[in-house]
Image (spheres, coloured by chain):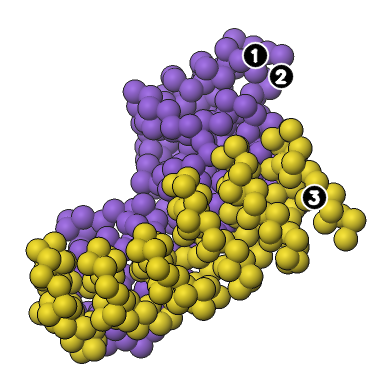
Chain colours: A purple, B yellow
Amino acid sequence: MNRSSFSISGEEFARLADYIYRRTGIFYDENKRYYVEKRVFDRMKATGHEKFRDYFLYLRCDASGQEFQRLVNALTVNETYFFREYDQLKCFAEEALPEMLKGGCGRERPLRVWSAGCSTGEEAYTLAIILLEMLDSDGFGFEVHATDINDEVLQQAEKGVYEQRSVREVPSVYLEKYFVPVYGKYCLKPVVKEKVRFYQVNLLDRAQMQKMRGFDAIFCRNVLIYFDDRARREVALSFYESLRPGGFIFLGHSESMSRIAPIFRVRKFKNAIIYQK
Amino acid sequence: MEELSRLIELLNSEDEMERLHAAEELGDHTSSEAILSLVSCLEKDESRVVQEACVASLCRIGTEEVAEEVAKLLRSSDPYVRNAASEVLQLLGDRARHVVELLLRDPDPDVRTLAVRVVGEGQFSNASALLRSVVLNDPDANVVASAVEYLGEIGGSSEDRDALHEVRARFSDPFLEYAVETALRKMGE
């Protein structure tokens, strides 16, 4: 079997796309067929399957769920960058944040935001930049907590040094204000770095998760797609306990908390749909 | 043992957070008392978050006894409880196989339909064989239609196709006929 001769029929693609959608909430339409096909081909090769039908059966009936996880990992590009999913960030800044501040946080106590599964830190620093812009001059206090299971990415995040690719969506005014260009890279200024606390947390470790309390908002975007159904449900419950009453949870735009655990209220804002305790 | 009794007691607390923590911690126990308490709490508690914690804990315990007790909730009048029970069985997969085989022969067609969904959506290594058996033997057209739909998705062997062709002879139901056509098309016929 070689890549050039491999293709999935329309029916087969529809079956696969439907199955992936039901399990993860991620929908791949016909336009993504080539993209999906390439990754399926790689997984078929890795698992020694010649025919798509055989591979699909293996995928569906693998009781451990490991192959499904590997396919999802291959399909979900683990790329992160500053100001990713801008509409959601706009919703956080312009719609959710004013509600949180009305509740007294920021003045009586610092606003606490958690970037869960922060990888190399782009999301956490983006949140710090937004909060500096929205709150700092008004004397509001805030903390950004950023966690990941992978200590190597955390070390990288703490450095706060990024390639041009990571900052491509940063508005030029912020790029100038919060970054210093050094030999083709972009270094964050201390004013941003000192607002973010990085540390290691495994979202499935209940003892660690019990320490994560009192957050006003949690960002966990494109992280839960890597978990199986049972783990997703456990993490959703832990997030519920980590949030203050009325706290918000932001998932990736293709993810749905209602499909994971029906314990949060769905809030339809102008810029995005988010979940609230 | 004292700890287990304390947690079971806390499931009746008036404080939702206390019940939530108790439900979560009971997931670390595998005794019958823990399982029965969690199943009862899932069925009766009025807090959705506590019910969800029961579901998560039952999945974590994940024994055959969990499957047996949870299966009883498929008869609940509360759709959330029925769906939650169905999800636990799906997640248990082969560990719930024996229970699911019994459910597929239940006298109540609604329970059989839910059991078909458990097989179709869950992770069962013999899913095709279980669905084929429903297609070939179940007397209810709706239950069979549901199995046909899932077989179209999961199946593909010559036995699966033969079963789909045979079902046409057993029923003359336009909806079922449509389901069979669709399933065979999905199998590439």
Q: Residue at x 60, y 37 (%)?
A: B47
Q: Looking at the image, which residue sits at the far right?
A: B2
Measured as percent of width and height from the top left, residue A77 is found at: 39, 58
Circle count: 3
Q: Residue at x 47, y 75 (%)?
A: B102
Residue position marked by numbered label 1 in the rendering:
A104
> Which mark's residue is nearer the viewer, 3 or 2?
3
Residue position marked by numbered label 2 in the rendering:
A109
> Which mark's residue is nearer the viewer, 1 or 3?
3
Q: Amino acid at mark 3?
A: Leu
User: How far separated are the C-alphas under marks 1 and 3?
Assistant: 35 Å
Residue A103 in which image quadrant = top right
Q: Are marks 1 and 3 in contact (CB under 8 Å)?
A: no
Identify the subunit bearing mark 3.
B
Identify the subunit bearing mark 1.
A
Q: Is residue B38 left or right of residue A51?
A: right
* B88 versus A43 height, above or below: above
User: How far separated are the C-alphas under marks 2 and 1?
Assistant: 8 Å
